[in-house]
Image: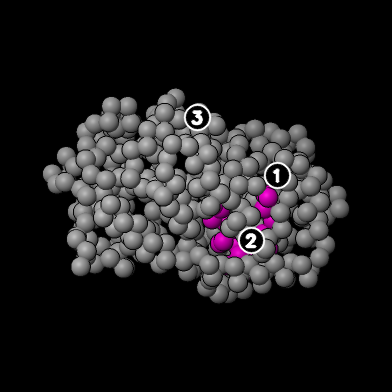
């Protein structure tokens, strides 16, 4: 019988609109709670203004909860710049292992696991969290060196980590792919979809982008590629769904300069449930990203039967496999040409839809949680 572990988790991503980090953390904890009835979980959040949504607390049998009423920026300064105070102070209890859902280390006395979603902020440090941006590369380097375990979601990202930090031992970097939330596989009634279409005034024919509006998503090239499709496909629209980021204003200016205001739609952040309806109503998903460590929308769209167009860079071909069409993300003409080949071929769209629904069987949150728990035990036994 293995020894009981005291495991610490940072739940602060739940205080923001849910993006990739929050989706990962929520699903990991929910499924750990389902399979692990032995270990103790020490969960914390921190904010001076926002109350933690208690409904997001996973149903662990044994857990301890701290919602710290302190300024996040101040706490981050002490943690990331000074490495103090140790997390154990807030629980008055030693922790065997603490898991940070980002590559930034939390000060703790026990063993440490960090999660690396991607490392684009090392190339663009001003895009990291404001309170840590100026020293982000140094923080990441220190965190990865200190951590006993590093979790990432694709072989592409593991190779990228080891290339950037050659002193790391490959054995401490573990690839554990994301899973798929089951509700993306549920049938949606036609009446519900029609009501949803009317609610958002969605056109009959549209390309869908899902993600934060930021430079690495390569949306300026996507919009230029879409411009080439406007004339040959007069009913086609482009719908951008996701949190407004640092590039939204410049993207809106680009759309206006190309006179595409009636064909390109910025719909902002939507719930996960609404997102499923977008996948069911779209003509195709398009992911033109320059850097992705995984790519949640690819798996979600495939689960809903939506054909996928994606960059042939980073982790996207690894995630999509043979069930997607790929283009050069730095070439708007190739992006437009590949998209047109899909629009012109109903049989190809049907084939990709069927292959995508087979592909998503490879992604399981139950398996991800089980492999993560096994990694914790492996680290504690070393």
**Pointer 1: residues within 10 angstroms few (<14), some, or many (20+)?**
many
Provide the residue designation for mark 1: 329
Instruction: Please report whichever mark, 3 or 1, sits nearer to the chain's N-terminal start.
Output: 3
Looking at the picture, does residue 381 appear above or below residue 190?
A: above
- Picture disc at residue 125: 3
Q: Nearer the viewer, residue 5 or 306?
A: 5
Where is residue 244 drawn, in percent x and y?
A: 55, 41
Q: What x and y, as percent, mark residue 162? A: 49, 41
Residue 295 against residue 82 in the figure, above or below: below
Q: Residue lying furthest top in this view?
A: 134
Identify the residue shown where x is 22% and y is 64%: 2
Instruction: Note whether residue 199 is visible.
Output: no
Q: Was residue 311 drawn as part of the magenta stretch in this picture? A: yes
Query: Residue 327, can we see it?
Result: yes
Q: Are marks 1 and 2 in contact (CB under 8 Å)?
A: no
Between discs 1 and 2, the one toward the N terminus: 2
Q: Which mark is residue 321?
A: 2
């Amino acid at each position: 019988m293995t020894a009981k572990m005291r495991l610490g988790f940072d739940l602060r991503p739940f205080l923001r609109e849910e993006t990739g980090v929050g989706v990962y953390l929520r699903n990991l904890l929910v499924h750990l709670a389902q399979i692990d009835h032995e270990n103790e979980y020490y969960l914390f959040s921190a904010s001076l203004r926002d109350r933690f949504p208690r409904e997001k607390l996973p149903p662990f049998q044994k857990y301890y909860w701290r919602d710290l009423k302190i300024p996040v920026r101040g706490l981050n300064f002490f943690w990331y710049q000074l490495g103090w105070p140790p997390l154990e102070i807030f629980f008055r209890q030693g922790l065997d292992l603490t898991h940070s859902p980002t590559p930034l280390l939390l000060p703790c006395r026990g063993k440490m696991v960090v999660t690396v979603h991607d490392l684009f902020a090392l190339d663009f440090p001003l895009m990291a969290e404001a309170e840590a941006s100026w020293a982000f590369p140094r923080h990441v380097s220190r965190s990865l060196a200190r951590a006993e375990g590093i979790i990432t979601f694709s072989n592409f990202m593991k190779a990228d980590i080891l290339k950037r930090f050659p002193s790391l031992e490959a054995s401490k970097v573990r690839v554990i792919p994301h899973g798929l939330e089951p509700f993306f596989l549920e049938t949606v009634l036609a009446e519900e979809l029609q009501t949803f279409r009317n609610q958002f005034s969605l056109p009959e024919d549209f390309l869908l982008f899902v993600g934060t509006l930021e430079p690495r998503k390569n949306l300026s090239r996507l919009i230029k590629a879409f411009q080439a499709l406007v004339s040959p496909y007069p009913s086609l629209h482009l719908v951008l769904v996701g949190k407004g980021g640092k590039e939204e204003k410049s993207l809106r200016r680009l759309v206006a300069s190309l006179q595409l205001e009636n064909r390109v739609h910025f719909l902002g952040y939507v719930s996960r449930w609404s997102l499923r309806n977008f996948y069911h109503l779209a003509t195709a998903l398009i992911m033109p990203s320059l850097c992705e460590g995984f790519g949640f929308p690819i798996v979600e769209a495939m689960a809903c039967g939506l054909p996928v167009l994606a960059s042939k860079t980073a982790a996207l071909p690894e995630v999509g496999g043979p069930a997607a069409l790929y283009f050069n993300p730095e070439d708007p003409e190739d992006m437009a040409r590949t998209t047109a080949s899909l629009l012109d071929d109903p049989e190809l769209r049907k084939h990709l839809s069927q292959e995508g629904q087979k592909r998503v069987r490879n992604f399981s949150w139950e398996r991800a949680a089980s492999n993560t728990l096994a990694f914790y035990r492996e680290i504690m036994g070393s």
